[in-house]
Amino acid sequence: MKNIISLMLIGVILNACAGSASHEVVSANRAGDANLDCRALDAEIVRAQVIIDGVNQDKQGISGADWVDGILWFPFNLIAKNQNYKNATQAADRRIGVLQGYKSKKGCDSNTTEIKAKSASIVQELNDLNAMYKAGDITKDEFEAAKRDLLNN
């Protein structure tokens, strides 16, 4: 009986820890960045801005119940989540700075309003895809493929 209870407790702990941090931490520099044209640089900036927007949206989504659960049961889960938020945001900011530098060197126009609008649209589409996946309307493979297509176009 004790073994069953112990296994159940370990399962609960592992399950609670599994999804603590999920935002991509991007590298500021990637091979080939200097060879990108203005349009490709804008697309990369949008991808980085999507990460920042997603982090900000998730930060707003932390409820009182999440905090209570984190304090009582898994404080390290909240710490990991907050560290991931910080790392992902800082990395995306650095990437945007590097890409803006390339845009400046190439004499590209800087249209931040259009970039913000595109990233907000992508974040909304990602949320819709996630909701469809959670509702069982699409499979995990379909979700991943749609997400990849959305972020690469």
Image (tube, rainbow, N blue to C red):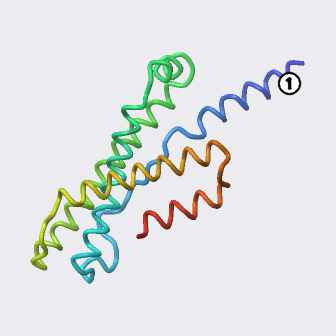
Q: Give how far across and how far down residue 137 sits, in percent.
A: 66, 49
Give the quarter of the figure containing the N terminus: top right
**Residue drawn where x is 24% and y is 81% of the image:** 37
- Pick out the residue farthest to the bottom: 35
Q: Is residue 103 above or below residue 72?
A: below
* Residue position for label 1: 4
Give the quarter of the figure containing the C terminus: bottom left
Q: What element carries label 1?
A: helix
Q: Give how far across and how far down residue 108 sits, in percent.
A: 13, 75
Circle 1: residue type: Ile
**Residue drawn where x is 58% and y is 60% of the image:** 144
Q: Give how far across and how far down residue 88 sits, in percent.
A: 36, 49
Left/right of residue 100 with respect to residue 39 in the rendered view: left
**Which quarter of the figure has residue 45?**
bottom left
Disc tally is: 1
Q: Is residue 152 above or below residue 147?
A: below
Left/right of residue 100 with respect to residue 47 in the rendered view: left
**Residue drawn where x is 69% and y is 28% of the image:** 12
Q: In this view, does 27 lie above or below 106?
A: above
Viewer-side residue, 57 vs 19:
57
Q: Give how far across and how far down residue 83 sits, in percent.
A: 39, 39
Viewer-side residue, 136 vs 20:
136
Viewer-side residue, 80 vs 122:
122
**Residues packed near mark 1 inside 10 Å, few (<14), some (14 to 19) or many (20 plus):** few
Left/right of residue 52 with respect to residue 65 in the rendered view: left
**Residue drawn where x is 57% and y is 64% of the image:** 145
- Pick out the residue farthest to the right: 1
